[in-house]
Amino acid sequence: MAIVVVVLGAYTRLVDAGLGCPDWPTCYGHLWVPTSEADIARANEAFEHAPVETDKTWPEQIHRIFASSLGVMILAIFALATRARIQRARPWKATTVLLSLLVLGTILRIIIGHAFDFPLLALAAGYFGWLAWLAKREPSSPEPYKLVALLAGLVILQGWFGMWTVTLNLWPQVVTVHLLGGFTTLSLLWLVFQRTSGWKWQADTESRPQIARLKPLMWLFFALVVVQIALGGWTTSNYAALACPDFPTCHAEWWPHADFKQGFNVLQHVGPNYLGGQLDNYARTAIHLSHRIGALLVLLSGLVLIFRLFLSKQAILQRYAGVISAVLAAQIALGITNVMAGLPLAVAVAHNAGGAVLLLCIITLLQRTHHYLGETQQENSDV
């Protein structure tokens, strides 16, 4: 479901349907979309600044429905994790109460309007602060309760950013954070799945030093992938994907004129409609160039990691090297195709999904490595 939501989010952005429904959580006052001529006429009268475009209302509302369904599923997972925690007689009440206040605050925000935004953010700060304290106070446990609690809070926060995406007229900062939140939700769900499935490597103390030396390189690759995803979000939210129409050069130059100061000005005014973007081409060129440089750094660090994994002569690590090689090659090919072919919709959506898959690959590798090193360290302590 999370993968579907991420892909639908990319599709919605790419077909310029982010404001397909100018209100939230309804769409022109409807739970679905206005379909009859009478409904459309009333909607156009109520929202004169945003007349109904049926080819844009349905992608936006479908995305909302899937995202809301995902939120309900995650809250159900939290309920199951809480039940397991109660059975083990471990503290759970404060977390559940705070999360319930977040849900109630979201309902009040819908009723009261933007005047409740600051109390809502204060509630979120309190909830995530409590989780940080809980993580520091309590040792790790087999059941991923704290991870699920973090996921439950995050998905509510994602709903708010989905709302602000609409109410703030696609403000690039909000759109980018919303995209990163979607990738984070998917990643945390994947981690919960890994933890509850019990998948792990067989502990082999002889291989521990070699794998431990690879861990910093894995973290570097992970960090660069996250930064590159953020740059991709900033690129798409500022409509800079085609700012450089050629490859490998940009406007037939290796380093064209670019306005990095304006391109990465995060103090843009809230208020104008950012559909189609507000930046000039020099600023968009700076964003596009940064995304290309990020892709180069991801490629170089990925190649080093892949080479080191192959040299390890560990069959499991070599399999991971093969998977990362395939995903990385596909991502580079899709990115180049986006530029050369003028951003075909299917290719652009696939490129977004490929970024998510690459992120999940390195998260899996890090999770397995962390568990493996922890087990072998425990074995050494036992000895």
Image: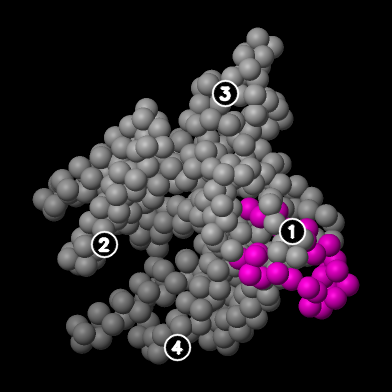
In terms of sequence position, does the residue under pointer 2 or pointer 4 come before the other?
2
In screen coordinates, is 341 left or right of 93? right
Q: Can you give x and y, in whole percent of width and height, for residue 103 in the image?
A: 31, 37
Which residue is found at the position 50% from the left and 31% from the top? 24
Marks 3 and 4 close (CB-CB < 8 Å): no
Helix, strand or loop under label 4: helix
In terms of sequence position, does the residue under pointer 1 or pointer 3 come before the other?
3
Q: Can you give x and y, in whole percent of width and height, for residue 174 in the image?
A: 52, 51
Count the marks: how many? 4
For badge 3, the amino acid type reads: Tyr
Q: Can you give x and y, in whole percent of width and height, for residue 330 in the image?
A: 71, 64
Is residue 249 one of those drawn in magenta?
yes
Q: Main secondary structure of the magenta part?
A: loop
Task: Say few, some or many: other residues with alpha carbon within 10 Å of mark 4 (under 14 / 14 to 19 / 20 or more).
Answer: few
Helix, strand or loop under label 3: loop
Q: Identify the residue under disc 1.
A: 280
Q: Identify the residue under disc 2.
A: 132
Q: CA distance from mark 2 to mark 4?
A: 29 Å
Which residue is found at the position 39% from the left and 50% from the top? 154
Q: Which mark is residue 28?
A: 3
Segment colored magenta:
237-264
Determine if residue 329 is in view: no
Disc 1 versus disc 2: nearer the observer: 1
Task: Say few, some or many: other residues with alpha carbon within 10 Å of mark 1 (under 14 / 14 to 19 / 20 or more).
Answer: few
Q: Nearer the viewer, residue 254 or 180?
A: 254
Task: Say few, some or many: other residues with alpha carbon within 10 Å of mark 3 (under 14 / 14 to 19 / 20 or more).
Answer: many
Which image quarter: residue 228? Answer: bottom right
